[in-house]
Amino acid sequence: MKNSFTRGAGYVLTGLRWLPKAGVRGFVAIPLLINTLLFGGGIWLGASQLQRLDQAVQGWLPDWLAWLHWLLWLLFVLTMLVVIFYAFSLVANAIAAPFNGLLAERVEKMVNPDSGIQPPPAESSWRDLLFSPLAELRKLLYFIGWAIPVVVVSFVPAANVAAPVLWVVSTSWMLALEYADYPLGNRGLNLQAQRGLLRQHWLLALGFGGMTLLLTLIPVLNFLAMPAAVVGATLMWNQELSGSA
């Protein structure tokens, strides 16, 4: 079936294979570099502060407990891994949002030169860069509205056994909507219209979002999940959704 779960998942993997292509690399490298510098600076700052704390701890620890300062460093490393693993995608989305619309536009021009999308004027591009965080905030509020019922179910006895499945399904839907926004937004579809379109192809959307979720859970690949999903969503729009808009 054309609108299949596996076909939706395949678009994300195709997007991953597109990342090294000329014309795409720049839109991937710039936000990735910004995020790397941001997280690298945060880790360096945290390590320097921990080093001061470690010196203070060694000053008052008795000799037979001197090994505890190594435990402190181990806890720091584990904490940094958890923070990077879970927080990177959130921070990356906020920073890369202005670039993702341009990435979607570039990919669409590559696969469909006659798409009719014209390069926006400079003042429009700067306006998009400035106001894209506000659009992200609107999506975030919508996502919170989805998450609240799932959180409630998680605390209801007996019903909470379904909570993990509900979390996966709701997160997959949110990720599909998050990344489809870039090619669909370039076509002038607002959030309400995007939801309606994806509901018509809900199995395709869940497959796409599910594979995106899986990539975000794999170390190293989670750094590439966002641009791969933007590229995949653009390809999915051109090949599956454009006739339904």
Image (cartoon, rainbow, N blue to C red):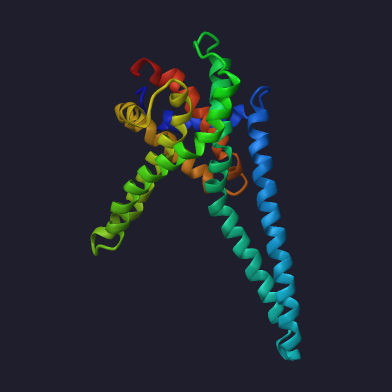
- Residue 231 left/right relative to 64: left
Of residues 123 and 28, the one nearer the viewer is 123
User: What is the total number of numbered labels drawn onto the structure image?
Assistant: 0
Q: x%, y% of residue 46?
A: 68, 64
Q: x%, y% of residue 92?
A: 57, 44
Of residues 185 and 25, the one nearer the viewer is 185
Camera sees residue 110: yes
Q: x%, y% of residue 236?
A: 45, 24
| Residue occupying the point 68% across, 35% down | 29
Q: Is residue 20 above or below residue 47?
A: above
Camera sees residue 14: no
| Residue occupying the point 64% across, 33% down | 28
**Quadrant for the C terminus in the image:** top left
Asked which quadrant contains residue 193, the reply is top left
- Residue 156 left/right relative to 136: left
Q: Is residue 71 above or below residue 77?
A: below
**Residue at the front extreme of this rendering:** 123
Of residues 174 and 78, the one nearer the viewer is 174
- Residue 79 left/right relative to 139: right
Asked which quadrant contains residue 199, the reply is top left
**Quadrant for the N terminus in the image:** top left
| Residue occupying the point 38% across, 45% down | 141
Q: x%, y% of residue 197?
A: 33, 26
| Residue occupying the point 62% across, 64% down | 78
Q: Is residue 185 above or below residue 33?
A: above
